[in-house]
Amino acid sequence: MIDASNKQVEKREPIKEPIKSKELERRNDELILQPWATKYSEADREVEEQEDDETYRTNYRRDRDRILYSTAFRRLQYKTQVLVNSAGDHYRTRLTHTLEVQQLAMSIADALGANRDLAEAIALGHDLGHTPFGHAVERVLNKILLSKDQGCFSHAIQSARYVEHLATHKGEQGLNLCIQVREGILKHDTDIFKSDFGENQSKQWNCSSLNPERPGGIEAQIAYWADKIAYLSHDWDDFKTSGLYDEAIKEKKDEVKELQEIMNYLTGREDNNWELRDLIRNLHENLVSYTFNTLKNSNINESRDIIKLTESNMMEHKCNLCKGKQDANKKEILLNSLVVNFEKEYRRQVLKARDLLGQIYAQSPTVARMDERAECMISEIFHKYETKVHLLPWKTQKKIEAEGNKCRVIADHIACMTDRYAYRVYDELFLSRGINYK
């Protein structure tokens, strides 16, 4: 029996004054962060700032706050996740999705000894460039711009473009975020790795300084999977509560049964009797446990070793593929090579669940009709603005005059719209035709 009275309790040294930013960063770097974490001492801004202006926040917390107080962040509350706002008050929006990603990224970073402030900033900023009405409008803007030889439209690139070019801070262009945050925002979506980062992507925004061809560090990889965990869990929840699940059971019986079996596997249950928290907990646990074992058994001495190890994994996966399949599977190769990852079979089931849920829920007739309506609305708005620039706000007209790229500026303007603002603009432009989509 242990005598608690004999234990020597180390007294916590009282602080003599508030802990300022530099000391806070030093303590984290030396006492908390593991070798694979991005250190506060590595924080790198394009434009140096007066450190005297800062008191109690780390560099990455300053970035978090600039994102948090940006107009783009506030607009997320009125941007569609899957179901439009008018479908109901309780479904996820782009903002609630972002907050769920933030919460997951921070807890995963803490568990792995990574930089939670950096992971949080990336998570909060990852969807700042998202369009109204979800991915439907992202697709239509991409199609329009490509048809006009004006490059592509990717919400991941647009998010990086927003924090570097479209937003302002202290009267200057861009938020002047640390490169580690900007890089993580760009790389939160593996779609940018589908093919080589080429001319079309560069026409949207030249991200060469963010190394778009290379994988991100550990915090960027954490934010990537936090995004995917949030997607899977809240899409399943909204699917069940929206009534679309009951409809799918009747019309897509085999697909729903397969999805239920996968979800049972992911939660460790066999009776379909599980709560959302069971799914999130198991996803979180598998990711953290498998990743920690990988980190523990790898020779990692500094944060950049995560990128090197990921690239080494990519080379190994490439060697296992036929030459012709390497380019076609570039995204898949990266996904399987990330250091932050699920156990192999568990990852396969996670991705399969996402695909199935997309087919049954995100591509259901109800959602498809919402998407079709949004695509038609935005296409008409774009072409109206393109042919009649004087209908745009004065500020946007001046940007076209200054930058000369009319189509790209119009795409920026539309991407910044909320769902309800897009409805209003459509009504103002086409009300005489007797069309009102509200």
Image (spheres, helix red, strand yellow):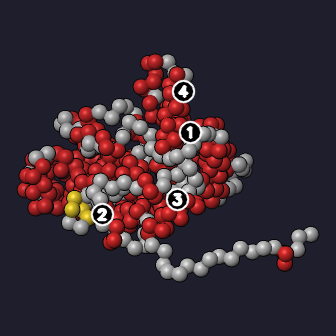
Say which residue label 1 marks: 352
Q: Look at the picture and state if 200 lies above or below 280.
A: above
Q: Are marks 3 and 2 in contact (CB under 8 Å)?
A: no
Q: How many marks?
A: 4
Q: Is residue 155 left or right of residue 432?
A: right
Disc 4, SS: helix
Amino acid beneath label 3: Asp
Q: Are marks 1 and 4 in contact (CB under 8 Å)?
A: no
Q: Is residue 56 left or right of residue 35?
A: left
Q: Look at the picture and state if 322 lies above or below 295.
A: above
Q: Residues within 10 Å of mark 2 (few under 14, many from 20)?
A: few
Dividing the image into 4 quarters, which one contains the N terminus? bottom right
Q: Is residue 248 left or right of residue 368?
A: right
Lower sequence index among marks 1 and 2: 2
In the picture, the disc for residue 364 is none
Residue 13 horizontal/vertical position (percent): 62, 77
Q: Residues within 10 Å of mark 4 (few under 14, many from 20)?
A: few
Which residue reaches farthest top?
Answer: 323
Mark 2 or 4, closer to the camera? 2
Kindly report the distance in space between the C-alpha atoms of the residues bearing marks 1 and 4: 23 Å
Kindly report the distance in space between the C-alpha atoms of the residues bearing marks 3 and 4: 32 Å
Say which residue label 4 marks: 316
Residue for point 26% across, 47% down: 376
Amino acid beneath label 1: Lys
In the picture, the disc for residue 49 is 2
Residue for point 49% across, 68% down: 24
Q: Is residue 49 left or right of residue 107?
A: left
Kindly report the distance in space between the C-alpha atoms of the residues bearing marks 2 and 4: 42 Å
In the picture, the disc for residue 29 is 3
